[in-house]
Amino acid sequence: MHDFAYRQGELYCEDVPLSRIAKEIGTPFYVYSHATLVRHFRAIDSAFQHVPHIIAFAMKSNSNLAILRLMAREGSGADIVSGGELYRALKAGVPPEKIVFAGVGKNREEIRYALKSGILMFNVESSDELRAIDDVAAEMRTKARVALRVNPDVDPKTHPYISTGMKKSKFGISADRALEEFKLASSLKHIDVAGVHKHIGSQLTDITPFVDALKKILELVEQLKGRGINLRYINIGGGLGITYSDETPPEPKDLSAALSPLLRDLKCTLIMEPGRVIVGNAGALVTKVLYQKASDVKRFVIVDAAMNDLLRPSLYGAFHEIKPVRETPAAKSVTVDVVGPVCESGDFLAKDRAMPEVKAGDLLAVMSAGAYGFVMSSNYNSRPRVPEVLVKGREIHVIRQRESLADLVRGEAIPAFLKSKAGTPSAKTTKKRKQ
């Protein structure tokens, strides 16, 4: 459930018409609902209330400081995958003791930063990484808490780009090597083997893969107990899907009903890493129609948002519902490609989409864009990144300003040898030629 709804033909976010935001700050822009974010977080938190747990919001889904602060105020930690995300999480007030650091390529500087910050643990993905963490911890005369990420080889039945639990995946340690890797971890003097971690993929719409993967992990936990390795944390990752089109994903309470009985007697703290399920349907991308164009075989609606603003349709072929901000009951339905200004044939927000006929100046809302939206945006074609807005009731809060043209070149520099007038040799070059 989300807080985007029509009122007298006008699309609102909570108590604010989207057209008002467009008038005040221009288009395109991302908009998020405060009420939806809170409700989605609490739905997960309450579903697992009978199991000791930590929710570590997967901030790769949305890393805006205001969103992170809101999650932290609700009691959330953070699942991070870089030093930059650690910086953001701490800046937003996320308690370091609720931060878990995942990802296959942590460098030594990031490991040092995380240890200095006092994070809860690292999710370790390889024996090389394990040794690197031990080495850095030894230099710092401390111990690093770790959970080994085990790849349970369970098919999550999702898009291959966001499937992470199969044998061929770059993520995790294969299940048949897990005991050996835990033995190695236990032998390292500056490693505290605190838990086990698994994450099989994103946008899962069936509970069965979650259950199958957890059962495999629990078998491993029992084997480890027999070898004197008693874990304190079991991290089941994230991945619960949302409705983009006609999906019917399970709700958090359904997931809890399936998993909680398996966890009840373990005396371990459960860690979860939800992202999309919290923020995905809490956000939308609002864009303006610039032009219409028709060929012999296609009809195009050209808008001012593009693949650099929302990459998912181009990258995954992902579906996002597109709604007119103002309904026109008499409008006929047409089949169009909704495309942006970027100079790529892959620049589209929808293909062969049946939708009400629109005209230049009309506003469209690209729904379910709160997750993996702005965070994946870029300045391709030297396009400034768009603003982000948080709506709370009747309040409009700009939580990221629109980038300016000057922002596009911030940090760049022209070396001295190129600063002479274009087409004119520099003084040094001219002198050398005379010699």
Image (spheres, helix red, strand yellow):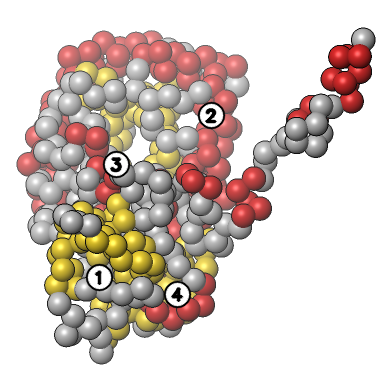
Task: Using the image as rendered, state which of residue 56 and residue 294 is in the foreground.
Answer: 294
Q: Nearer the viewer, mark 3 or mark 2?
A: 3
Up-down relation of residue 13 to residue 248 (above or below): below
* Residue bearing the label numbered 3: 315
Q: Nearer the viewer, mark 2 or mark 1?
A: 1
* Residue bearing the label numbered 1: 323
Residue 97: percent from left, percent from top:
47, 42
Marks 1,4: beta carbons within 8 A: no
Q: Residue furthest left?
A: 208
Quote the CA–CA distance across marks 3 and 2. 28 Å
Residue type highlighted by circle 4? Ala
Number of numbered tags placed on the structure image: 4
Residue type highlighted by circle 3? Leu
Q: Which mark is residue 42?
A: none
Quote the CA–CA distance across marks 1 and 3. 21 Å
Task: Locate the C terminus and report the quarter of the image it occupies.
Answer: top right
Q: Nearer the viewer, mark 4 or mark 2?
A: 4
In what element is the residue under mark 2?
Answer: helix
Q: Residue at x 52, y 14 (%)?
A: 135
Q: Residue at x 30, y 14 (%)?
A: 181
Q: Earlier in the sequence, mark 4 or mark 2?
A: 4
Quote the CA–CA distance across marks 2 and 1. 42 Å
* Residue bearing the label numbered 4: 22
Instruction: Tell me the crowding category of disc 4: few under 14, some 14 to 19, or many 20 or more residues within 10 angstroms, Cα based.
Output: some
Marks 2,1: beta carbons within 8 A: no
Quote the CA–CA distance across marks 4 and 2. 39 Å
Answer with the quarter of the image where residue 287 lies: bottom left
Residue type highlighted by circle 1? Lys
Q: Is residue 277 left or right of residue 208?
A: right
